[in-house]
Image (cartoon, rainbow, N blue to C red):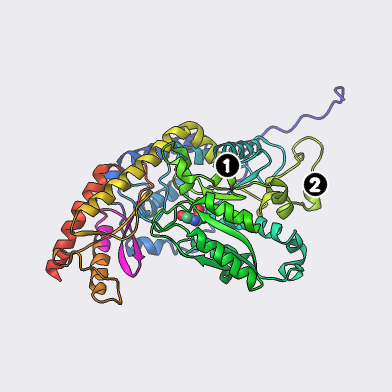
Amino acid sequence: MDDLSLPPAPAPRPGRLDPVDWDAFRALCHQVVDEMVDRFQTEGEGPVWRPAPDDVLSRFRAPLPTEPASLETVLDRVRDDLLPYTLGNTHPRFHGWVQGTGTPAGALGEFLIGAINANTGGREHAPIRVEEQVVAWMRELFGFPRGATGLVVSGTSMATIIGLAVARHAATGGVDREAGLDGWTGVRRLVGYTTEDGHRSLQDAFSLLGLGASALRIVPMDDRGAMEVGALEAMIRADQAAGCTPFVVIGTVGSVTCGAVDDLVAIRQVADRHGLWLHVDGAFGAAARLSPVLAPRLAGIERADSLAFDFHKWFHVPYEAGIVLVRDGERHRATFGGRADYLNSLDSGPAAGDLWPCELGPELSRSFRAFRVWFSLQHHGLRAIGDAVEANVDQARRLAARVRAEPELELLAPADLNIVCFRYLPPDEAGASAPRGEGGGTHLDELNRDILLELHHRGIAVPSPIEREGRFGLRVCLCNHRTRDEELDHLVEVLLRLGRSLVLTA
Ligand SMILES: *Cc1c(COP(=O)(O)O)cnc(C)c1O
């Protein structure tokens, strides 16, 4: 058909929403890049967190923006109302919850994601290959077989919903998909297992999947915060005897309270004996696989049926990005697969493609999340990311040792990975600490709450609050590649000073 004389395509013109003056737009972009690089370089000099004043807050209640504003005006708002009042998770003295710090290179990648603006629901284009590459890398890193499938998602919460949906599909022989759980001839209640420290998102997934949060049984923990596998097996037998159908056990690699790691090898054996699916929540802890020193602690992770973890936590990829890997790719596809007629593939061209990502999860339109993983991992390399993980674990060990050695500080939980939970104890009460309800705990809770509020409001550091066995304390989660030993030494010194002065003024 080379001889067809088709009319020439019209000359391209800017769209209705494109810049009117491209040169001015380009100059503004360069200026924003400069400002953000400055911010990365100097952020550690300022407070970690500060409260937004009322006039700033009131501007977040502006009316619908019907009329346009110049880009300069909108950027002024970002500068004045937003940048000074972020949570601080990119700051070296941020140690709260489990938050990623991102990287400057990652931020550059975000601009590219926006510019490319790919929809990775499916079809034939390079962005689909990027996601396949990320999935293949993770399959290799975690020792999953070639037939395993994966999907880059918003985070571990979504990855867990998908992993457990596939587990439910397997348990019901797929009947659940059309007929729902009522249509499943078993009509025996499906139940699963985690520990008290299992993440809250597990309960949400159980609710959302129609299983009910009460179907998620709580297995006792040992003194390191890991699942007692003997108790797990006893509970499975008891549930079977009571007419329920145990179908999944969720192993945690890095519990959110104290970083505990379940014994996945032992859990796998119990799961195999009873025909259970093993789902692993490795939200942040899976990153320990990147360190040759730490990886052996995750033994058995390669035998999970499904694995969920985040790139936006300890891999330092910008928000949001997590992944679910499913060992039985056929089962994964059977759980979500099938497309509406208007999405049918052609043999070639942009409408081609056999397995589309939208067939591995509930989302059709999907952002180019895989790019941020692909971009960051190539640039930093897994070794450097693993070194940062290892450094955080060393810092946690060092901080825990300092807490143990300091009579005015008390460790509240094991600190085996990257999380240290502790509290201040006035000198005359050292050794006399008791949990609430056993006498005398309450004022220590209040004292430690006040210390934490001082740290936060003065912008000194951001650990997060924790309550452990009735004791309130501070939780330092080291998931930050910018934190050095100096920051943690400073935190301890300030905390002791604050504690002493608060006791005096009480
Ligand atoms: C953060 C976290 C989750 C939830 O992950 P999101 O990325 O926030 O959805 C689940 N489990 C654990 C252990 C976590 O730390």
Q: Is residue 290 left or right of residue 502?
A: right
- Residue visible at 58% across and 36% down in the picture: 140
Which label number is shown at residue 80?
Answer: none
- Local SS, label 2: loop
Q: Is residue 330 left or right of residue 157?
A: right
Q: Is residue 232 left or right of residue 464?
A: right
Q: How many angstroms separate mark 2 from mark 1 (CA)?
A: 24 Å
Q: Which residues are magenta?
A: 452-477
Quick one: label 2 or label 1, which is nearer the N terminus? 2
- Residue visible at 31% across and 66% down in the picture: 472
Residue 354 percent coordinates (x, y): 76, 41
Quarter of the rendering containing residue 447: bottom left
Of residues 429 and 107, the one drawn nearer to the viewer in this rendering: 429
Residue 321 percent coordinates (x, y): 53, 47
Quarter of the rendering containing residue 27: top left
Label 1 crowd bin: few (<14), some (14–19), many (20+), radius 10 Å: many
Residue 107 percent coordinates (x, y): 45, 40
For label 1, the residue is 370
Q: Quick check: can you spot residue 212?
A: no
Which label number is shown at residue 344?
Answer: 2
Q: Is residue 287 magenta?
A: no
Label 2 crowd bin: few (<14), some (14–19), many (20+), radius 10 Å: few
Residue 456 percent coordinates (x, y): 28, 59
Q: Quick check: can you spot residue 195?
A: yes
- Local SS, label 1: helix
Q: Amino acid at mark 1?
A: Ala
Quarter of the rendering containing residue 468: bottom left
What is the quadrant of the C terminus in the image?
Answer: bottom left
Q: Amino acid at mark 2?
A: Asn
